[in-house]
Image (cartoon, rainbow, N blue to C red):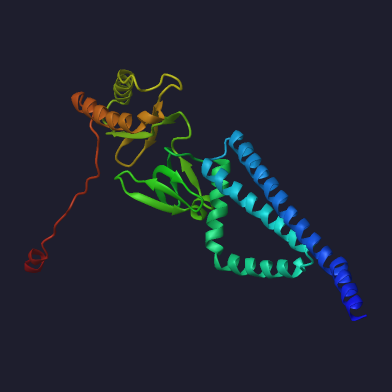
């Protein structure tokens, strides 16, 4: 009788407990393997879609890994749920841990979000000369958390993306052409028309200056000690600084050769000898 009861218990344990548990484990393993395979395929598909959209390679890799990791977490939770594990408690723990990490890494997450926006919207690209966050330089790299700039004197500057995205961004390389804004001051006694004609000659002699839009040479202001002439030629962006420097030098030299003076502030000092007044 004892042997029959043991056989019955063993048969009942196998059919009621062990066999269903093994089936749940088998199904959970299948869920994990199939889910992982699907996550890999979806991750690769997501990366290809971003590459076709022209998204930066750094962001493609980073977001692709995030999508793959999130899908793996979902698959793992589904497998654990099938085993009978209470995933709601795990989600609560993960949520609390995520909140704590988020608060601790608030600035880093802000830089990350700003980096994603910079890469997606592309207000500038590698090689552009920009001014942002109080810093000017050539963009050498756009990372997830910071942007690398090279200053004019060849210094490397690392600027957090959060400071760049939340402030004004001036991209000097965004447009193919730029306008040079110069002001030349002449004395009140000089010939204004002659000065404008000389400036026009210098501008026409420089083939780097564009004909369209036409350069503007106009009277800007009657200042306290000078007549100011505004000069506004257009050039290709790459020629901006060389042309600006040459214009300053050539127009100054032309003025000197033709008797046009560039006034500068002058002061008269009157010295009084108090000792002479006392003697008187």
What residue is at 93 percent from the left and 80 percent from the top?
Answer: 1
> Toward which corner of the image does residue 127 lie, by quadrant?
top left
Relative to 10, say whether 42 is above or below.
Answer: above
> What is the x, y in percent for residue 244?
32, 32
| Residue at 54%, 54% in the rendered image | 112
Image coords of residue 259 (percent x, y): 20, 26
Q: Is residue 78 shown to the viewer in this render?
A: no
Say left or right for 170 vs 14. left
Please tell me which residue lies in front, 123 or 88: 88
Q: Residue at x 21, y 23 (%)?
A: 258
Q: Is residue 206 above or below residue 85?
A: above
Could you tell me residue 231's position as x and y percent? 37, 29
Left or right relative to 209: residue 47: right
The residue sitting at 20% across, 28% down in the picture is 256
* Residue at the farthest right position: 1
Residue 88 appears at what percent x and percent y? Answer: 76, 67
120 and 273: which is toward the camera: 120
């Amino acid at each position: 009788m004892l042997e029959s009861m043991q056989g019955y218990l063993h048969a009942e344990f196998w059919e009621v407990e062990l066999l269903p548990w093994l089936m749940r484990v088998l199904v959970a393993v299948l869920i994990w393997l199939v889910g992982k395979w699907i996550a890999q395929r979806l991750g690769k598909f997501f990366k290809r879609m971003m590459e076709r959209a022209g998204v930066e390679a750094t962001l493609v890799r980073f977001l692709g890994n995030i999508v793959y990791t999130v899908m793996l977490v979902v698959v793992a939770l589904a497998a654990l749920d099938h085993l009978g594990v209470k995933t709601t408690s795990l989600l609560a723990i993960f949520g609390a841990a995520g909140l704590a990490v988020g608060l601790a890494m608030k600035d880093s997450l802000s830089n990350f979000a700003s980096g994603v926006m910079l890469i997606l919207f592309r207000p500038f690209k590698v090689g552009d000369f920009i001014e942002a966050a109080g810093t000017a330089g050539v963009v050498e790299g756009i990372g997830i958390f910071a942007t690398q700039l090279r200053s004019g004197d060849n210094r490397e500057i690392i600027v957090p993306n959060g400071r760049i995205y939340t402030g004004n961004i001036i991209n000097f390389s965004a447009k193919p052409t730029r306008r040079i804004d110069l002001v030349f001051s002449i004395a009140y006694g000089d010939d204004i028309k002659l000065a404008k004609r000389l400036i026009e000659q210098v501008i026409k002699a420089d083939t780097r200056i564009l004909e369209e839009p036409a350069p503007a040479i106009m009277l800007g202001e009657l200042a306290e000690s000078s007549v100011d002439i505004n000069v506004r030629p257009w050039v290709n962006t790459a020629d901006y600084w060389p042309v600006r420097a040459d214009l300053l030098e050539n127009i100054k030299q032309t003025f000197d050769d033709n008797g046009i003076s560039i006034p500068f502030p002058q002061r008269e000092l009157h010295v009084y000898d108090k000792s002479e007044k006392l003697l008187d």
